[in-house]
Amino acid sequence: MKRFFLLLLIAALLLPLVGCQKSCKNKNKGPAEPTPAAPVTDDTSYYPFSQLGDVSAYLSLSPSDWERPTITLRADDYRVTDAMVTDVVHDLQKKYLPDCPTLLQVTDRAVAPGDAVYIYYTGYLDGVAFDGGSNVSQSVPSRLEIGSGQFIPGFEEGLVGVRPADTAIERRTSGEITADDVILFSYNLTDTAADGTTTEENRANVRVDLSDPATDERYGEGFSARLIGAQLGQQLSFTLVEGAGDQGGRTYEGVVSLAVRTRGVTVSATFPTPYPNNRDLAGRTATFEVVVSYIEEEVYPDPDADFVAAVGFEAQTDDPVAEFLSAVRADLADEREEQKTADIRSAVFALLCERAEVIAWPAGSVEFFYDRQLADITAEFNQANQYYLIYYGYSPFETVGDYILAAYGVTDETDGLAFLRRECEQIVLENLVLLRVARARGFTVTDEDVRAYAAEVAAYYNAYYNTDTITVADVIEQYGTERLISRVLFSMVLDALVPAATVIYE
């Protein structure tokens, strides 16, 4: 058998159906007994929906539910804007022009969504800086694109509107330590008890705020006084005696490598659950002091004739730039029209799914998809647990259900297995809707229809990968006849219903 990973590229192309996995609402009546399904054929890759008898025994959906549907779309989603044209030009300039774009460091305007900002930050829980929650020891700030989701929820949103010029950071690696400094102290600590027993601890880059009155409570009376006035980079050794006389004490030996003074903004953010990097932080809300050093702006030259030629655009007029920009806009308009067509089809089918009412699930149909998906997800769960145990020493996923919710990005559910079953019910519902409309309209899928669709899929992948090795037989073998029948029916049904649809643009 040929290596066939190529056909796993685009899920939307050959998933059971498209368009309403999340939006359709199943109204299961529940009390009716399931009607036995037809026997399963040799093709076991997909539930044999095409062999079901009277679909109305499973689904309530009348012609009035699908004739002349009315849907609503957003007009702005299909307009080509100047910004879209500019984005295309900029992408091409990055590809074809050397040293493009020029990067500027901007500090005199507010941060906006989509900006790339360079920041220093320190995180606090209950007023105390936590390990791993600061980057002020770095020689350069960290890059963050606002809206990327790179940081925990709430962090990036909290920086929108901040002017870099209103924040500041001073970092010193030499000179005298002052009472206003926040320092990074690497030390060996020998803790001697009153009975003479000792314990030792080695710490690297411990963040200490010398202006915080609680510092001496944490590190010992007189700790701050011993550091204030010392030199950065100087080897230090001092003992803090506990109580009166020789009743034990703490001996610190180490170096203060960095002193920092900041004027930042306070941002609140909540760690997700689970949080693989540190399970103790999961679900907790932290405050961060953030200094925005600058916003990085990309500056592009105006497109000229040389750029148009470099792109490979063959102009037919004496104004190649205007002609090129017009061609870009026309291409974008074609893409928007294609997207509109796809969205109309998805919306029409979603409307049918919303109106359908399940009377009974065909015997074994939901279990067919549930068992297969659960088996795949369980394998992924075991792999994820092994990965986290190796790299983090623990796994954030206690059960397969926890992993399902995390994998789907579901935050408002608690039962991952129940969620997965509803997803599988949705697959069955969509196929039942297809069968109901197709049979009412007298549509049938022939072997020739399946082979024609498989030929389209094979041609798509061969073109995408610049190969001719994928055949119609390969596609049929990989996906199975039943699954391909569902895809063909989807096209037939939507081709019939969409022309009669009324589309309202808001």
Image (cartoon, grey):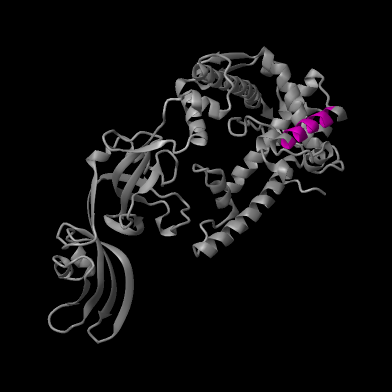
Going by the image, does 62 lie left or right of 296?
right
Q: Residue at x 46, y 24 (%)?
A: 304
Horizontal side of 52 relative to 72 (left or right) equals right
Count of numbered circles in the view: 0
Residue under the image location 33 percent in, 73 percent down: 202
- Residue positioned 41% across, 51% down in the render: 283
Magenta-drawn stretch, dominant element (helix, strand or loop): helix
Magenta run includes residue 296: no
Q: Is residue 219 left or right of residue 45?
A: left
Q: Is residue 50 above or below residue 373?
A: above
Residues drawn in magenta: 449-462
Whether residue 469 is visible to the viewer of this picture, yes or no, is yes
Q: Decide which of 251, 104 is in the foreground and name it.
A: 104
Where residue 457 appears, as percent x and y from the top left, is 75, 33
The x, y position of residue 87, in whole percent, is 48, 28
Q: Nearer the viewer, residue 34 or 77?
A: 77
Lateral position of residue 447 relative to residue 435, left or right:
right
Q: Position of residue 265 (x, y in %)?
A: 26, 44
Compared to residue 260, the image places residue 264 above or below, namely: above
- Residue at coordinates 21% horizontally, 73% vertically from top-left? 236
Q: Quadrant of residue 242?
A: bottom left
Q: 138 or 493: which is nearer to us?
A: 138
Where is residue 219 shown, x and y percent of the image?
23, 69
Q: Quadrant of residue 180?
A: bottom left
The reply to whether the magenta stretch includes residue 455 is yes
Q: Is residue 166 above or below residue 286?
A: above
Q: Is residue 359 visible?
A: no
Q: Residue furthest bottom?
A: 196
